[in-house]
């Protein structure tokens, strides 16, 4: 059966928004990714946690078919902790505290089962660790990478070396521009292709997502939601829905599969923001996914019409 | 024959971008709107210019079927002048000079022909003038309004009085949020409906456009372009394409017509930004419009697929 390996953070998050707060909730890129991808396929989670990581959270991940053989437990430290406050406009996020804890010594090691997986997602961690993980894989069919401004600024050459070995980037608008130094996205996508990847997926928050690939450009708008409660983990949930769906397809390199993957990514991310942390994903049913997929189809649907029936370009008789 | 009235600025613009500059080019909201809408239907332009307004520019508008009976000429002053500089990122625009000139005494008067038109676009001018124009109309089928932060801050009560009489707003994300005090767009759209309009069209620049109406939500992403030279007038060009197309339809209140209007608006705006000021619109051919309409269809196209064929939600046998 097809499966995905994800390497990234497993964390406890403290989050305040105008709609409520959580003092300590399960989070981290690898967690959000796994819960979304696990809806579609088996996932090997490669990460590290500390002595404070609860039995309950571990059981919760296991119960969803997430393989935790590669989740290292360090007895001498605590799990990565992140604290943030969102404003009334949820685009406005302020980090109040970041404690790397056991994550600072993270040295990812893949299990034998993980090495054989056909899909790999390198969540946002140090670029040399991303490359070290990639080199442990036998022969992945598709490798996708996320990163952030911190690595683009501080570890550019290492990051470029890693990017040269991946098939696809999943990053945001600002990261695309910063990485390439090119504000025009069409030209920036060409610069990314020259770095190695054949495909660029751009996360745009409330504006949806865009994709540049061999078959051209595709985009999906964001779905306006009544209750946007907490955007934490939306990007990794998007990536999980995207790659999770793709891993179920017989041929992951087919353009129509990639386009549907964009929609499944958007669907999963749209659910993620409706509640704190992972809470919405934990109650999600297949029928919810099916219905929202159709909502996305409807929200971009329009019919072609021949412009020939329109009146001539400039209506001479109307001129004076 | 169906026609549209537009009331708004006719101006000379001086623009600098990293790709070049123009010291004095024909501009203004009513001009950009008219050139886009004039591609589809007859347009009555209601505005004011000064003694410096050239014969050549007047002839250029006339040649495109734009009715200038309502374009007042003031001998004692100059045409509205605007000067701005765009950064390498074209979202970054700095106004260097604004001279209202004859526009400061603008007292729009509709011609007999204009009063009978079925469509009215109130471009961004003082809200009491917008209402005065609206009251001169006989029985318009559809009235759309644009505005800006300046009026939302300084003339809110007058603006709300005007908005109560219009069918549709065509504004940007920030204006929607500022006008309603609601950062969530879905809830903001409901607040707009309570003000009077039945439809809200949101211009999002490079992210495209979104529409809230009686039949729900619709959105179209932006088309990434190789050469984005000058975004001046893109919003008014969008509105011109939108209402111009709508005016050609037998029934402007049909949802599928409104959705296609969103695409025609996006198509015209995408051309507008490819050259300075109105330059691209002046060379545009019907075949260009047809081709780009199809590009928009393709860029959002994906096929439905039954999620039922996907493997069960969480793969128990994969869990350890």
Image: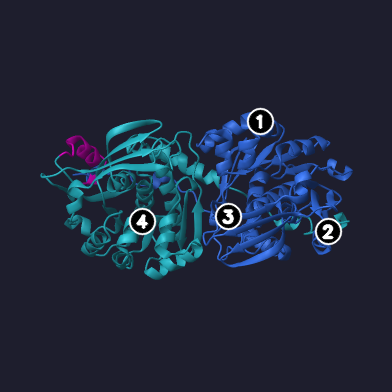
Chain colours: A cyan, B blue
- Residue at screen point 71% across, 43% down: B125
Q: Which of marks 1 and 3 is in front?
A: 3
Q: Is mark 4 on a helix, strand or loop?
A: helix
Q: In this view, does A262 lie above or below A143?
A: above
Q: Same subunit under labels 2 and 1? A: yes
Give the residue at mark 2: B62
Distance from disc 1 to disc 3, alpha carbons, whole Å, reads 28 Å
First-in-chain label (3 vs 2): 2
Q: Neighbour class for label 4 at 10 Å: few (<14), some, many (≥20)?
A: some
* Res B276 quadrant in image: bottom right
Q: Is mark 2 on a helix, strand or loop?
A: helix
Distance from disc 2 to disc 4, alpha carbons, whole Å, reads 52 Å
In the image, taking residue A109 as reference, residue A292 lies left or right, namely right
Q: Same subunit under labels 1 and 3? A: yes
Distance from disc 4 to disc 3, alpha carbons, whole Å, reads 26 Å
Residue segment shown in magenta: A52-68
Q: Is mark 3 on a helix, strand or loop?
A: strand
Give the residue at mark 1: B157
Q: Is residue A54 magenta?
A: yes
Q: Same subunit under labels 2 and 4? A: no
Q: Nearer the viewer, mark 4 or mark 1?
A: 1
- Residue at screen point 85% across, 59% down: A316
Q: Mark 3 lies on which chain?
A: B
Give the residue at mark 3: B94
Distance from disc 4 to disc 1, alpha carbons, whole Å, reads 43 Å
Q: Same subunit under labels 4 and 1? A: no
């Amino acid at each position: 059966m097809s499966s995905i390996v994800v390497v990234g953070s497993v964390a406890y998050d403290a989050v305040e928004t105008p709609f409520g707060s959580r003092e300590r909730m399960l989070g981290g890129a690898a967690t959000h990714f796994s819960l979304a991808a696990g809806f579609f396929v088996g996932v090997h989670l490669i990460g590290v946690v500390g002595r404070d990581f609860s039995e309950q959270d571990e059981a919760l991940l296991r119960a969803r078919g997430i393989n935790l053989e590669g989740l290292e437990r360090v007895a001498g430290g605590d799990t990565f902790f992140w604290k943030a406050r969102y404003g009334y406009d949820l685009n406005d996020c302020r980090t109040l505290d970041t404690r790397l804890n056991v994550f600072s010594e993270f040295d990812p090691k893949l299990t034998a089962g993980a090495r054989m997986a056909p899909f790999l997602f390198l969540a946002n961690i140090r670029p040399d660790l991303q490359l070290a993980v990639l080199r442990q894989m036998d022969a992945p069919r598709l490798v996708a990478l996320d990163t952030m401004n911190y690595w683009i600024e501080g570890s550019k050459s290492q990051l470029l070396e890693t990017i040269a070995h991946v098939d696809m980037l999943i990053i945001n608008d600002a990261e695309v521009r910063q990485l390439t130094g090119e504000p025009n996205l069409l030209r920036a996508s060409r610069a990314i292709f020259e770095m190695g990847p054949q495909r660029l997926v751009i996360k745009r928050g409330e504006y949806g997502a865009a994709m540049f690939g061999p078959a051209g450009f595709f985009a999906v708008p964001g779905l306006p939601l009544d209750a946007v409660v907490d955007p934490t983990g939306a990007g990794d949930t998007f990536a999980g829905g995207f790659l999770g769906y793709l891993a179920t397809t017989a041929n992951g390199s087919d353009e129509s599969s990639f386009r549907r993957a964009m929609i499944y990514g958007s669907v999963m991310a749209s659910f993620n923001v409706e509640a704190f942390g992972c809470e919405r994903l934990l109650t999600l049913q297949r029928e919810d996914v099916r219905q929202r997929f159709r909502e996305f189809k409807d929200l971009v649907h329009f019919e072609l019409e021949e412009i020939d029936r329109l009146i001539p370009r400039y209506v001479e008789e109307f001129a004076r």
